[in-house]
Image: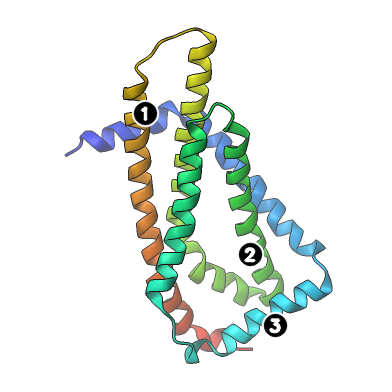
């Protein structure tokens, strides 16, 4: 029963540098995304503000299709995971892996930054209720898949340079198994985003009304 957790613990310890590196890339994306809020045009800002305020004003009257939100969330995250996995199998995929991690951070930073800029403390609470819960799972999983992809790609490059002939079938099997585990956790994040976060927003909708 404790075998798999031990493998994960050893994996994290062995790749701590890669985790730190990709976490920094993600944080840079979040920071730049939040800063970009200050540079969008007034018309763009007003359009987004109008959409957010209209949604919050009518949230109780909106019939939420929780299953659709779940499937959209799951689809988006699984697509990102599959793309990272495929890039890890390619020796030219490393810069694209970094780009995807950066982009995910940028979108998150922009979204939270705009909510806080527009709604102040209400925007902060809205971010905590609607964005934070699922991202507590999504971000570590995306980073972990990015680490496996980065590690696999760099290992292949090193082996080719040093003319090593490792058992790539075994390497790929371990690679796929690890990523299947992290992808399974993305299903849980989709359930949170689809069924729990909308309920939080509805419960606190009166506080958000403007």
Q: In which quarter of the image is the C terminus?
A: bottom right
Residue at image mark 1? 172
User: From the viewer's perspective, is residue 57 above or below residue 91?
Assistant: below
Q: Residues within 10 Å of mark 3 (few under 14, many from 20)?
A: few
* Quarter of the rendering containing residue 187: bottom left
Task: Indicate which disc, 3 or 2, sits on the residue closer to the N terminus.
Answer: 3
Q: How crowded is mark 1: few (under 14 residues within 10 Å), some or many (20 or more)?
A: few
Residue 111's disc number = 2
Picture residue at 63% right of the left edge, 86% below the top: 54
User: From the viewer's perspective, is residue 38 above or below residue 176?
Assistant: below
Residue 116 visible in the shown view: yes
Q: In this rendering, which labeled residue sits more in front, label 3 or label 1?
A: 1
- Label 2 element class: helix
- 142 displayed left or right of 195: right
Q: Alpha carbon of mark 3 to alpha carbon of mark 2: how far?
A: 15 Å
Residue at image mark 3? 50
User: From the viewer's perspective, is residue 77 above or below residue 20?
Assistant: below
């Amino acid at each position: 029963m404790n075998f798999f957790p031990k493998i994960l613990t050893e994996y994290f310890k062995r790749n701590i540098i890669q985790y730190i590196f990709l976490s920094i890339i993600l944080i840079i994306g979040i920071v730049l995304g939040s800063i970009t809020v200050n540079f969008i045009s007034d018309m763009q800002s007003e359009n987004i503000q109008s959409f957010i305020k209209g949604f919050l004003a009518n949230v109780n009257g909106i019939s939420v299709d929780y299953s659709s939100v779940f499937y959209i969330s799951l689809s988006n995250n699984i697509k990102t995971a599959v793309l990272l996995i495929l890039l890890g199998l390619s020796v030219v995929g490393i810069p694209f892996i970094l780009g995807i991690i950066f982009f995910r951070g940028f979108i998150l930073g922009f979204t939270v930054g705009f909510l806080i800029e527009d709604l102040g403390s209400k925007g902060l609470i809205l971010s905590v209720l609607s964005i934070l819960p699922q991202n507590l799972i999504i971000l570590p999983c995306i980073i972990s898949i990015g680490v496996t992809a980065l590690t696999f790609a760099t290992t292949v490059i090193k082996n080719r340079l040093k003319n090593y002939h490792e058992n790539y079938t075994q390497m790929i099997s371990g690679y796929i198994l690890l990523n299947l585990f992290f992808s399974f956790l993305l299903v849980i994040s989709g359930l949170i985003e689809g069924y729990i976060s909308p309920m939080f927003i509805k419960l606190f909708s009166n506080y958000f009304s403007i």
